[in-house]
Image (tube, helix red, strand yellow):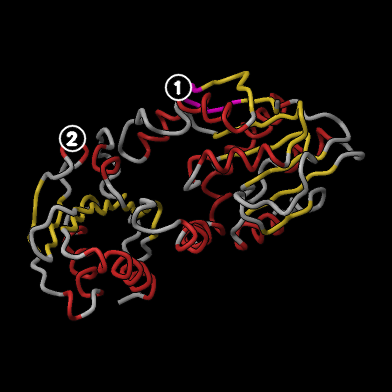
């Protein structure tokens, strides 16, 4: 068994075994993926907890299930039920994301040999047990090819930086900077009297930023967006592209971004694809409970000390601009 699969299934078994008796449903993925993953998960449980049977259950996830299959693993029939959703499957499949929405565990399974945990309900495990390692596993495997795959987005980043209107001489932060696609535009905007820091928790992403030469006018810092190594109120602009929706606790993340921003400073939440187009890329539609939904994001920002002053979500980009109160 590949080591990455072993790591993921061992962690899930460690988290779930103490909850027995329980029912674990593995849903989603390409044809046969759920049954295969379920069998590996069952094997990861200690021998004393392997009184499973593995059955195929079709259509569990309803409209979002499409032609995919599901597998039902049972220690014994129990009221405590956990759904593990494999985010993957045919690219042409469309649904409303109901299967993923109901899941307590979500796993990126587009590459079955490299599964990555993307969500675990807090009642099962504190994010400190999985978030950092799994995020690095997800983005680290993609870092080398990131610019080749998404290089056409660079003009959109420059436009978003211009919309944020950084002030010359300011400190601008690109939190979750990835390969640093916003860094050149930020450096040009704050000018020689200003300073730009790109912060990311994945070393391979920062290596890719250096390989692209984007460290020439910006400092690169290995850091977790939830605990930034910066004093209070130092930044005039925080640029956050593709960050908020990946945080296990978006409210806490927005509060941390507010902590490092001075009153009157700005936050630009950005993605070079609109929410509808991005969801369609993953075979679903946007869900009402997503943090970037306008009805949710405004209150989240307000509770963290921000005032949202602009919200755009057309097909070709997403942005929300907020001012630090």
Q: Is residue 319 magenta?
A: yes
Residue 63 - label:
2
**Image location (x, y in percent) of residue 252:** 55, 42
The residue sitting at the top extreme is 309
**Image location (x, y in percent) of residue 40:** 23, 70
Q: Quadrant of residue 280?
A: top left
Q: Real-space Cα distance between discs 1 and 2?
A: 25 Å
Badge 2: residue crowd in 10 Å (few <14, some 14–19, many ≥20): some
Label 1 vs 2, first from the N-terminus: 2
**Image location (x, y in percent) of residue 16:** 27, 64
Is 188 placed above or below 230 here?
A: above
**Residue at (63% x, 18% y) in the render:** 309
Is 308 placed above or below 7 here?
A: above
The stretch of residues the image draws in magenta is: 313-320
Q: Is residue 259 magenta?
A: no
Total marks shown come to 2
Is 56 placed above or below 276 here?
A: below
Residue 295 - label:
1
């Amino acid at each position: 068994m590949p080591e990455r699969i072993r790591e993921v299934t061992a962690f899930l078994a460690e988290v779930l075994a103490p909850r027995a008796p329980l029912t674990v449903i593995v849903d989603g993925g390409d044809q046969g993926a759920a049954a295969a993953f379920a069998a590996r998960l069952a094997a990861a449980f200690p021998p004393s907890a392997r009184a499973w049977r593995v059955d195929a259950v079709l259509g569990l996830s309803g409209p979002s299930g499409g032609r995919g299959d599901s597998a039902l693993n049972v220690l014994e029939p129990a009221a405590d039920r956990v759904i593990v959703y494999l985010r993957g499957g045919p690219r042409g499949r469309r649904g409303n994301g109901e299967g993923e929405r109901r899941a307590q565990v979500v796993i990126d399974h587009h590459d079955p040999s490299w599964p990555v945990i993307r969500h675990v309900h807090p009642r099962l495990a504190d994010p400190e047990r999985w978030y950092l390692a799994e995020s690095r596993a997800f983005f680290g495997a993609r870092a080398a090819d990131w610019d080749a795959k998404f290089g056409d987005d660079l003009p959109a980043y420059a436009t978003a930086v211009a919309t944020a209107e950084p002030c010359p001489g300011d400190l601008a932060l690109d939190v979750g900077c990835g390969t640093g696609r916003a860094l050149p535009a930020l450096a040009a905007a704050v000018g020689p009297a200003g300073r730009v820091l790109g912060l990311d928790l994945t070393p391979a992403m920062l290596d890719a930023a250096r390989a692209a030469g984007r460290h020439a006018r910006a400092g690169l810092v290995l850091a977790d967006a939830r605990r930034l190594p910066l004093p209070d109120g130092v930044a005039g602009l925080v640029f956050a592209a593709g960050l908020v929706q990946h945080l296990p606790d978006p409210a806490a993340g927005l509060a941390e971004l507010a902590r490092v921003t001075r009153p009157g400073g700005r936050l630009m939440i950005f993605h070079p694809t609109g929410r509808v187009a991005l969801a369609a890329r993953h075979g679903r539609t946007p869900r009402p409970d997503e943090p970037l939904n306008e009805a949710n994001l405004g209150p989240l920002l307000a509770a963290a000390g921000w005032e949202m002053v602009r919200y755009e979500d057309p097909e070709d980009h997403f942005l929300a601009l907020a001012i630090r109160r």
